Amino acid sequence: MPVYHRRPRWAIAEAQATPEDVFLNRRSILQGMGLAGLALATAAATRPARGQDGGLYPASRNDAYKIERDLTPEDISSRYNNFYEFGSHKQIHRAAEALVTDPWDIEIDGMVEEPMTIAFDDLEKRFPLEERLYRHRCVEAWSMTVPWTGFPLGALVDHARPLSTARYVRFETFNDPAMASGQKQVWYPWPYVEGLTMAEARNDLAFMVTGVYGKPLANQFGAPLRLALPWKYGFKSIKSITRISFTDQRPKSFWEQIAPNEYGFWANVNPEVPHPRWSQATERVLGTNEDVPTVIYNGYGDEVAALYEGLEGESLFM
């Protein structure tokens, strides 16, 4: 029986998306506006620490994944980042230059047929890369729209060959206080940890990210490998992944360990469930500073709501 791809209801017509040639020629536009220096400074500040990308970028855009908002300009999204390994403020892009991403290995272990360690450069070439336009909603009530490049997490799950008894996927980042100044703050439970159910990990939207804005990830975005889960608050999209473990025990995430009354395992975007210290009903859009209504599951309800049927007794936020 043939399998048909159902066009997501949140997809838009190609004519409404920013054309790739326009996006890639934005430097010439900036020069015409007398902002060439800003463009060059942005490119230098976001240049990845790794070497050649082997012609993998820019990747072809997957037209099934689009958004109705304009893309957030790179010079804005690359200057407003959470990366607590390098500090608790938003302007950590310069501090993140200390992140060494070459070489970079990812360990895959736990309840799998055979544990393995794979170099990032090999992982990046193993799976076909594509670009997807995703909403990104932070638990702090701001949002942006991003052109991520990567491959489906489900493809990596299949490659890992987890045992049938595995119920969760646990992700872990690096732990190197000598390199990352924020990790010298011993009151945080380093390394950063996050987790998903196997069903969440296999959802089509779950995306392993290797690049952004048509090139390899800049350090502040979580180079060289991060997760993108557009229906969840941003803290679930762990950065700079070094270990992926399969387990039958639900992982306790970094922020859940710190403040379990404020941050929980599910962390699905839900305007009806406020954070204990602020409302989640609206969000501030980076680039325009416009306040807009927040949508359940960040607008991806048709794709993910079925994952949470029968979980009415658990808070989708906590």
Image: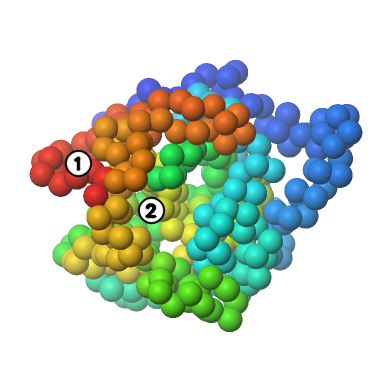
Report if residue 87 is visible in the image. Answer: yes
What percent of the width, then of the height, locates residue 132?
Answer: 52, 39
Is the Cβ of the residue at disc 2 closer than 8 Å to that at disc 1? no
Q: Cα distance, mark 2 to mark 1?
A: 16 Å
The residue closer to the viewer here, 78 or 247, is 78
What percent of the width, then of the height, locates residue 87?
Answer: 55, 64
What colour-coding does the image apply?
A: rainbow
The local crowd at label 1, few if under 14, some if 14 to 19, many if 20 or more residues have their Cα within 10 Å, is: some
Q: Amino acid at mark 1?
A: Tyr
- Disc nearer the start of the sequence (2/1): 2
Residue 310: image quadrant is top left
At 66% across and 27% down in the image, what residue appears? Answer: 19
**Numbered circles on residues, count:** 2
The residue closer to the viewer here, 276 or 310, is 276
What percent of the width, then of the height, locates residue 127?
Answer: 49, 55
Q: Secondary structure at mark 2?
A: helix
Q: Height in image: 93 above or below 183?
A: above
Report if residue 243 is visible in the image. Answer: no
The residue closer to the viewer here, 111 or 277, is 277
Q: Which residue is mark 2?
A: 236
Classify the position of the N terminus by image quarter.
top left
At 64% across and 49% down in the image, what residue appears? Answer: 79
Q: Is 171 on the left or on the right of 80, as rendered?
A: left
What percent of the width, then of the height, locates residue 269?
Answer: 33, 39
Q: Which residue is mark 1?
A: 308
At 44% across and 77% down in the image, what residue appears? Answer: 186
The local crowd at label 2, few if under 14, some if 14 to 19, many if 20 or more residues have their Cα within 10 Å, is: many
Q: Secondary structure at mark 1?
A: helix
For the view shown, which residue lies furthest in the bottom direction? 178
